């Protein structure tokens, strides 16, 4: 993927990255823990995002890269839209509220929780790398999309209130654009679809 991107866009820095891999093996009690399912969860939910960081990091701007213009973006018909991306790159990874140790009130889902808790750590670590490498030209954050009606939650459709994928995506994009690249501006942390921090 990285070499394909490099061929297609040799001189274009990556401006907005959203990395999404996630699967869930449900474990309600320790007796349901299964080594192969655990390995699969970590492969997709933790190692997947980590390898994406490895291979996409070279596309992010460095401190000497010129800031992007902050003009409103155009859609396919060349009409101006209200979306105005910031002057720096944003690298986002989908975490999950259940990956928060602070927030864990109900237990269960051992592998999923542990693999997503690691995403909070990876995000912070990658953001520290970007602070050194790119300063205010690039930042990393993690996101919690809310409970969304996707294949991921198919089993639970109709049992609880869910966001539609488009609503979740629009809300997350608003949150992403609101995170600023200065030290206290929210970089390196996890934000939910309402813009509220999810603590590790
Ligand atoms: N839906 C929710 O309520 C909810 C809540 C909290 C967090 N999340 C997180 O949000 C992210 C997106 O989930 P979603 O709701 O959009 O579910 P989804 O429709 O099931 O999407 C799952 C994503 O994971 C990728 N994936 C699955 N297995 C993979 C594998 N073996 N290798 C590489 N990629 C793989 C899929 O890629 P393909 O499209 O190529 O199959 C897809 O992009 C996930 O990280 C999930 O944990 C979702």
Image: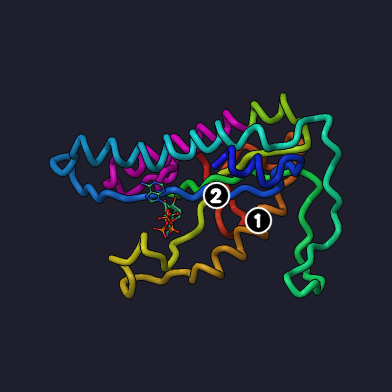
Relative horizontal placement of residue 170, taking residue 118 as reference (left or right): right
Name the quadrant containing residue 32: top left
* Residue visible at 67% across and 37% down in the picture: 59
**Mark 2, residue position:** 143
Give whichever of 16, 127 is nearer the camera: 16
Q: Is residue 92 above or below residue 80?
A: above
Is 125 in the magenta? yes
Relative horizontal placement of residue 140, taking residue 41 as reference (left or right): right
Magenta portion: prevailing SS class = helix
Relative horizontal placement of residue 107, taking residue 135 as reference (left or right): left
Contact check, label 1 and label 2, Cβ < 8 Å: yes
**Badge number at residue 59:** none
**Mark 1, residue position:** 175
Disc 2 crowd rating (10 Å Cα; few below 14, some 14-19, many 20+) is many
Q: Helix, strand, or loop for circle 1? A: helix
- Residue lying furthest top in this view? 132
For ligand 1, give the image quadrant.
bottom left
Name the quadrant containing residue 159: bottom left
Give percent across and percent down for residue 178: 72, 53
- What span is colored magenta in the figure? 98-126
- Residue lying furthest front in this view? 7
Disc 1 crowd rating (10 Å Cα; few below 14, some 14-19, many 20+) is some
If you read the primary sequence from the N terminus, does the residue marked by circle 1 or circle 2 appear first?
A: 2
Instruction: Tell whether circle 2 marks a residue whose Cβ is less than 8 angstroms from ligand 1.
Output: yes
Q: Quadrant of the N terminus?
A: top right
């Amino acid at each position: 993927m990285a070499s394909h991107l490099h061929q297609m866009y040799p001189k274009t820095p990556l401006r907005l990255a959203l990395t999404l891999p996630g699967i869930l093996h449900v474990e309600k009690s320790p007796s349901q823990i299964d080594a192969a399912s655990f390995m699969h969860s970590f492969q997709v939910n933790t190692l997947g995002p980590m390898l994406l960081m490895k291979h996409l990091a070279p596309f992010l701007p460095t401190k000497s890269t010129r800031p992007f213009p902050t003009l409103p973006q155009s859609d396919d018909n060349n009409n101006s839209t209200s979306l105005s991306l910031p002057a720096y790159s944003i690298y986002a990874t989908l975490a999950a509220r259940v990956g928060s140790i602070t927030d864990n009130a109900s237990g269960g889902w051992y592998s999923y929780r542990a693999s997503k808790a690691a995403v909070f750590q990876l995000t912070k670590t990658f953001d520290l790398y970007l602070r050194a490498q790119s300063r205010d030209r690039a930042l990393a954050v993690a996101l919690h999309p809310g409970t969304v009606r996707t294949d991921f939650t198919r089993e639970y459709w109709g049992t609880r209130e869910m966001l539609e994928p488009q609503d979740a995506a629009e809300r997350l994009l608003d949150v992403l654009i609101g995170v600023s690249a200065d030290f206290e501006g929210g970089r390196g942390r996890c934000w939910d679809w309402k813009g509220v921090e999810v603590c590790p």
